[in-house]
Amino acid sequence: MVEPANPASPQLLSARSLAVLVGATALCFAAAALGSLATTPNLSPWYEGLAKPAFNPPNAAFPIAWTILFALMAVSLWRVVMLSEGASRRGALIAFAVQLVLNIGWSFAFFAARSPLLGLIEIGLLLAAIAWTIARFRAIDGLAAALLWPYLAWVGFAAVLNAAILALN
């Protein structure tokens, strides 16, 4: 494993670094916006009409959690881009892209298709892709990998919630 970079290292404090951070943030929040396109129109009445388990968080919790998670993903991606090169970077970016596409796909499977079953299948793939991304990122930068653990935990919780909704409906 590569030792974590000094957060004040020159490559993290350059104009290029700022541009990469802005790009990573834009990419992650564009993914959030795409997922929202599938989610928002289906909250009422479809999602609101579903039976949900007692541990279902209030709807207001989801955008707060996802905003934090997408911000962490952006910082993680930024660190990997800035602290790696070549095949190592390429493999990490492929893993990140796969999980990001699956993240968007879950909103379309669960909400747009109105299918908790498709959502559960999709979220299982997403969990595997996040774990793969963490492993690829850890080989480059321990902090970049650590920033993705809350995302993995939240998606794990979402998978349990998705399964419970499927079982109840």
Image (tube, rainbow, N blue to C red):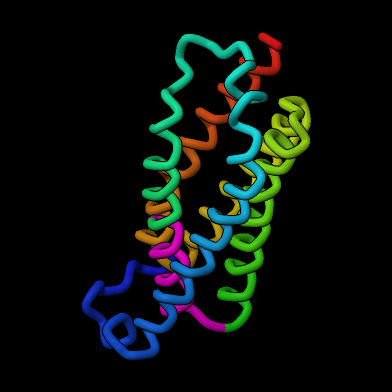
Residue 43 picture quarter:
top right
Q: Residue at x 61, y 11 (%)?
A: 51
* Along the viewing direction, whichever of 9 and 118 lies nearer the viewer: 118
Residue 82 picture quarter:
bottom left
Say left or right for 24 vs 132.
Answer: left
Q: Is residue 94 above or below residue 65?
A: below
60 drawn magenta: no
* Along the viewing direction, whichever of 20 and 46 lies nearer the viewer: 46
* Along the viewing direction, whichever of 61 and 121 lies nearer the viewer: 61
Residue situated furthest left in the rendering:
8
Q: Which quadrant would the C terminus be assigned to in this image?
A: top right
Q: Is the magenta stretch mostly helix, strand or loop?
A: helix
Q: In this view, does 16 lie above or below 91?
A: below
Residue 100: percent from left, percent from top? 61, 56
Magenta-colored span: 72-85
Q: Which residue is drawn at 67% across and 58% down?
A: 98
